[in-house]
Image (cartoon, rainbow, N blue to C red):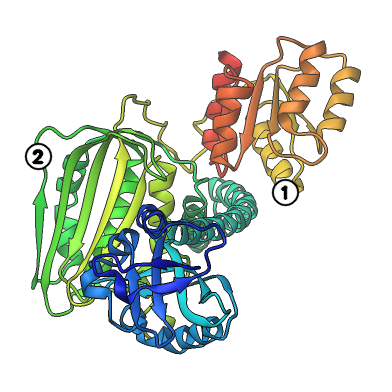
Amino acid sequence: MGSKIYRAYDAPEVGVLLPDANKASPDLLQALVASAEDFIIIAGTDGLILDWNPAAERSFGFTAMEAIGRDLDFMVPIDRRAEATQYFGRARRGERVARFETMRVRHDGSAFAAALTLSPLRAPDGEVIGVAVIGRDISDQTRAACDQQRSRKMEAIALLAGGIAHDFNILLLTMQFNAERLRAAPAGDEHRHDNVDEILRAIERGQTLARQLLTFSSRQSAAPRLVDLGERIGALQTQLQRILPANCAVVRQVPHAVWPVFVDPDQIETLILHLAGNARDAMPYGGQLKISVENTVLERPSETLPAGDYVVLRISDTGFGMPPQVVEHAFEPFFTTKENGLGGGLGLATCYGIVRQAGGDIGVASEVGAGTTFTILFPRGIEAVTESIPMSREIASAPGGTETILLVEDDPMVLSVTSRILTERGYRVYTAADGEQATRFILQHRQPIDLVLTDLMMPQMSGSELVERLDLSHPNLKVLYATGYRDQAIGAESLLDPDRPVLLKPYRPRDLLLKVREVLDG
């Protein structure tokens, strides 16, 4: 005796016989198929569909009436039909084809990722009389896996960029200190000053590159404050017009009541101007650059942002647009679509780093021939910080002192130039190359130490570990940390030693002297 499996909306006479190991009734089997979350498709050995459950209707968009009687190939992309024929043939020969991932096509023509299992259907005598296709739409899981892979890739590159930038900044710091010392000395002729000016300009260009690397790695020492994006965009109007040719119009849509955001204003300008430059390249024959700002509320957390208040910045153009395979790699460093690789670098990767460092998120939507839109979300700003002290190359007017300072730095070049700057301004400076040397010196030195200036990241013993050890014997010792990493600075100030400040590298001589004086006087 066997049981029948019926077509979803048709008469039972075309049903196929199945083994009745459990003597299940046709109605029970049909109810099981109809209630399944996975789509279940029954096909004859000729490949024609005999049954199509409600989950298949939801996944593919075809009703059972539309699907039954058609060949299975109608929902298979052309480039996957050879694969589908191969797997169907194996199932028709009696082999079960366990879960495999492939692509299928919906009623509207869109493709989606699917996980399928093909099983032969046998009559009581063992003859294969059909094939059951059981599967599910795994688009969301596939997309999440791709996003996770991309995130890991970006994080790995970010770590590399952060390490390169840190070492690069040490070299820049050394060159800068020596060049500024040379410039402050009496000059024999004007050409000497010209040469020094060239050195300083080259250092500034190197620092710009280092800032790009650090921004991409979300480790740039930013100076955030409350910023009105509407006002900032208005202030950039002239620069935007200069970037874009005369046949490109700039349209701004900025309401009056826009929430402030807590960002570095210079980085925001870099972000906007870079995206405007990309738009210019995409509109060689003219077009429109549209910049809009609006408030929004995320009621539920997204994959990258918590729920809360956000300000949305959109920058769109009417240019060539990008195909999906280009959009997928848009924020990767050194990726370019320009001929001969021109234009590749850290441009959009830097934009990505700026936004992520500010606690926001950036996405891009583009279509060939229909332009490109970048959508950026910044958290609503709720606090402000004071402006940083203006920097100057001149150290002659910087405050000095006569106090005793213990300088702990594992890089010999930074140790040498920092010690020299402090000594020239009147301080008595002792040096140590690591935490162990510093600990021994403190314990053996009989004269009081007024300040310990220590790098945070050192081998064997970190700066914070050194301070913890010194606190046992010198609990009131004044400390100034130094680091090239913004996240270390935040950790030091908020978690390690909230009352002990941090000096961010690369710093100018005057910044060093001002900060030392501030800590000593504090």
| Residue 116 percent location from the top left of the image | 48, 69
Q: Which residue is mark 1?
A: 413
- Lower sequence index among marks 1 and 2: 2
Please name the residue shown 21% across and 76% down the image. Answer: 320
Mark 1 or mark 2, which is nearer to you? 2
Q: CA distance from mark 1 to mark 2?
A: 52 Å
Res 339 seen here: yes
Q: Residues within 10 Å of mark 2 (few under 14, many from 20)?
A: few
Res 329 seen here: no
Q: Which mark is residue 56?
A: none
Please name the residue shown 28% across and 80% down the image. Answer: 69
Question: In the image, 460: left or right of 241?
Answer: right
| Residue 19 percent location from the top left of the image | 53, 68
Please name the residue shown 19% across and 51% down the image. Answer: 236
Above or below: residue 242 compared with residue 178: below
Q: Secondary structure at mark 2?
A: loop
Q: Which residue is mark 2?
A: 255
Residue furthest to the front: 1
Quarter of image, res 432? top right
Quarter of image, res 501? top right
- Disc 1 marks a residue whose amino acid type is Met
Q: Secondary structure at mark 1?
A: helix
Question: In the image, 438: left or right of 261?
Answer: right
| Residue 33 percent location from the top left of the image | 39, 58
Instruction: Pick whichever, 378 or 28, lies toward us.
Output: 28
Above or below: residue 199 compared with residue 439: below
| Residue 323 percent location from the top left of the image | 30, 75
Q: Residues within 10 Å of mark 1 (few under 14, many from 20)?
A: some
Question: In the image, 246: left or right of 368?
Answer: left
- Disc 2 marks a residue whose amino acid type is Pro
